[in-house]
Amino acid sequence: MKRTLTKVAALLFGVAILLTGQGLQGTLIPTRAALESFSTVTIGIIGASYFLGFTTGCLRSGALLRSVGHVRVFAAMTAAASATPLVLGLWAEPWLWAALRFLTGFCFAVIYVVIESWLNGCTNNETRGGVFSVYVFITLTVMALGQLMMLLYDPRELELFVIASILVSSALIPVVLSRSETPEKPNAVRLDLRRLFRIAPSGATSCFAAGLTNGSFWAVSAVFAAQVTGDTDSAAWYMTSGVIGGAILQWPLGLLSDRLDRRRVLAAITFGACVIGATIALTAAAMPEIALMLLGALWGGMAFPLYSVAVALTNDHARTDEYVQVSSGLLLLYGFGAVGGPLLAALMMGAMGAKGLYVFSAAVHLLLFAYVGMRARKRLPALIQHRSGFGDALTGAQTASAVYEPDDETGDIPKPS
């Protein structure tokens, strides 16, 4: 394990720099948009544009990698992703921002594919779960650090956009200088979304719901915090608290799901997220700021592990030769939810005020709790002969390295059957 981590240390260092810049942008952009008096719906559209670009990037990454290789693709996407914050800081135009966030989402999807396929190529079945758990921990912690960098300068000025650009572009250095061998040519993956709903309806539905709620959190929770507290600095602290909560409870809830029926764990998580979301919606305006941060951390602790547990549940029902297809399809479902979630949450906030974000979240989690709870009353099929460990599921939940690859040398993308 130590030898493997040493071998991929340069890649992980590059990831840390890259996602620090990404975390800063995640809070900076909605905060600056609110300061520019963009409507809540417009901010939601900008947030949804990122996830739409991300999904598109997953779909086209295979063709790019087959054309020019991993290193050149990473360099090109990093260059584009580092340029977009500078343009965002120079011109505060809503539709320009939506287009640039689409481009950023596209670039980061392809960058994740390069990094994570590289990590996969440097690990084996004995070390992969451990390496990716380190990767996930780095991802969550540095994004939280990036969000706190919001406190360094006034978001109305250009400095924070410049810092985000510097961080993203600097990630290129350790990656291109890494001595690790580049991964082999990606294999074809054929999606079958209907099979996902046949083998694990609760898992597939939970992934879509996680996209709805988590996507809306990333897109407009900074606006929620700023409106509730009246302080843009609080937006950074609030989003950071949510991410830290997700990092702390990710493993305990996942390991619990290894010991119990995962559907019951999913039901408990969604019920907890529903109750916490409703509490935030009803009391946020009147509670002390520290209490709001703690509730935000609890919400993140329930909401963020939802996807990983759902992946583990679905893999429990899949054949061993279906793991890549399952991970691909679940990521697609998450992407669909993450595109629609910010738009729906923004509409709710436009109609109800800041609390609309958590009214939307609580409603989604309540519906999911009812569905998963109903499914949990049914006995699991006797044909299941294996149970995926949460470590393997966490790897699948966080990696996009084998997603939506072309079916042949032409680069055509197979359609879901």
Image: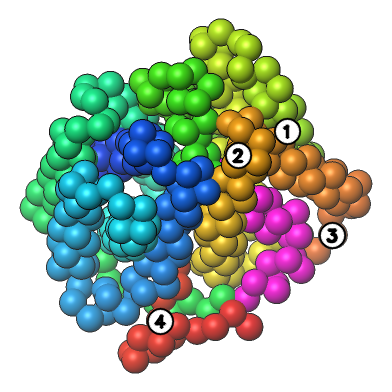
Which of marks 3 and 4 precedes in the sequence?
3
Q: Is residue 316 at all visible to an observer of this figure?
A: no
Quadrant (top left/top right/bottom left/bottom right) for the C terminus: bottom right
Q: How is the image coloured?
A: rainbow
Q: Is residue 34 at all visible to an observer of this figure?
A: yes
* Percent position of residue 87, x then y: 19, 52
Magenta region, residue range: 192-215
Q: Residue at x 45, y 62 (%)?
A: 52
Q: Residue at x 73, y 33 (%)?
A: 274
* Percent position of residue 393, x then y: 55, 50
Give the secondary structure at mark 4: loop
Q: CA distance from mark 1 to mark 4?
A: 39 Å
Say which amino acid is labelled 2. Answer: Met
- Left or right, 204 with respect to 178, comes to right
Residue linked to disc 4: 406
Quadrant (top left/top right/bottom left/bottom right) for the N terminus: top left
Say which amino acid is labelled 3. Answer: Pro
Q: CA distance from mark 3 to mark 2?
A: 42 Å
Dot 3: few (<14), some (14–19), or many (≥20) neighbours within 10 Å? few
Q: Is residue 151 above or below residue 65?
A: above
Q: Quadrant of residue 18?
A: top left
Q: CA distance from mark 2 to mark 1?
A: 17 Å
Per the image, is 208 magenta? yes
Report the front residue among 321 and 115.
115
Residue linked to disc 2: 349
Q: Residues at badges 1 and 4 in contact (C-beta under 8 Å)?
A: no
Give the secondary structure at mark 3: loop
Per the image, is 32 magenta? no
Q: Is residue 153 above or below residue 188?
A: above
